[in-house]
Image: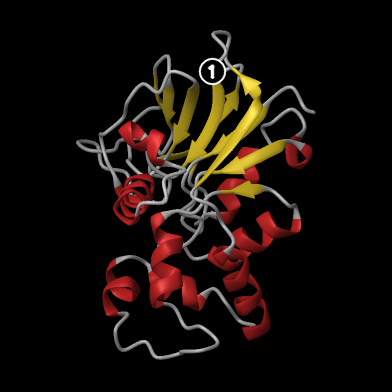
Amino acid sequence: MQNQIYIISDLHGCFKSLKALINQFPNKENSKIVFVGDLIDRGASSCEVVKFIMDNNYDCVLGNHEEMFLEFAPSKENEDLSNSKHWLFNCGGEETLKSYTCKNEYYKQYDFIKTLPLYLEYKDYKTTDNRYLVVSHSAIGKVWDKRDSKDKDDIEEFESHLLYSRYKNSNNKEIFNVFGHTIFSAPVINEYSCAIDLGCYHEKDESKLPNPRLCALEFPSMNIYTQENIEGV
């Protein structure tokens, strides 16, 4: 087992930036890496991002943009896009579909995305106070105790929270939760969690987001790596 694991923030099709970020890690592409989801949409290179993750057998959890992809993107059973306009034109889906030039590769990646879990536990990676790592797309918050529930309402609440919740973090004593989804200007770290989405795909905005970047947390060292967006370079 490697001593450190690298959790990488929301990519949104920023492949060049991803490669540059990983190149900063001591073991580069041979590192133990996990992604917080939102691999796709908005950026121009969703296909390359997903292929890179598949080819290297990296871990990844489901993001809300992957969930939208599975609901609204063409599938083998249904290629109709008449109900997909919001995803296509408001959520970056059009850029995702344009990134695919091979239908076989598209459906291979579609099947891979269907397998992504809501969260991943890494019980061999722990903080100094013995919290083990849990990676999810959004903050787990107060629904962690519902993860094994068979109740339909609990299942729906758990899934919705891990994909869509914002600013609803909570201290679950046994775990250290690393997540993305909500954009901050810098990583937000406390004793039980770390938010790492720094808005890599966004344009710079001096008043709202002056320094959009891709981010990785090295765990359990808590070292931070960042990479500015170089997609247009």
Residue plotted at (61% across, 16% down):
221
Q: Please state which amino acid type lies under the numbered disc 1.
A: Arg
The image position of residue 40, as x and y in percent, is 48, 61
The residue to which callout 1 is attached is: 131
Residue plotted at (30% across, 49% down):
157
1 lies left or right of 149: right
Q: Within the image, what quadrant is residue 191 found in?
A: top left
Residue plotted at (58% across, 55% down):
15
**Which is nearer the eye, 9 or 135?**
135
**Can residue 88 be seen here?**
yes
Badge 1 marks a residue whose secondary structure is loop
**Which is nearer the eye, 226 or 161?**
161
The image position of residue 190, as x and y in percent, is 39, 16
Image quadrant occupied by the C terminus: bottom right
The correct choice, above or below, for 59 with respect to 169 in the image is below
The image position of residue 84, as x and y in percent, is 32, 80
The image position of residue 73, as x and y in percent, is 44, 78
Image quadrant occupied by the N terminus: top right
4 lies left or right of 84: right
Q: Most extreme residue toward the left, as rendered? A: 207
**Which is nearer the eye, 144 or 181?**
144
- Image label count: 1
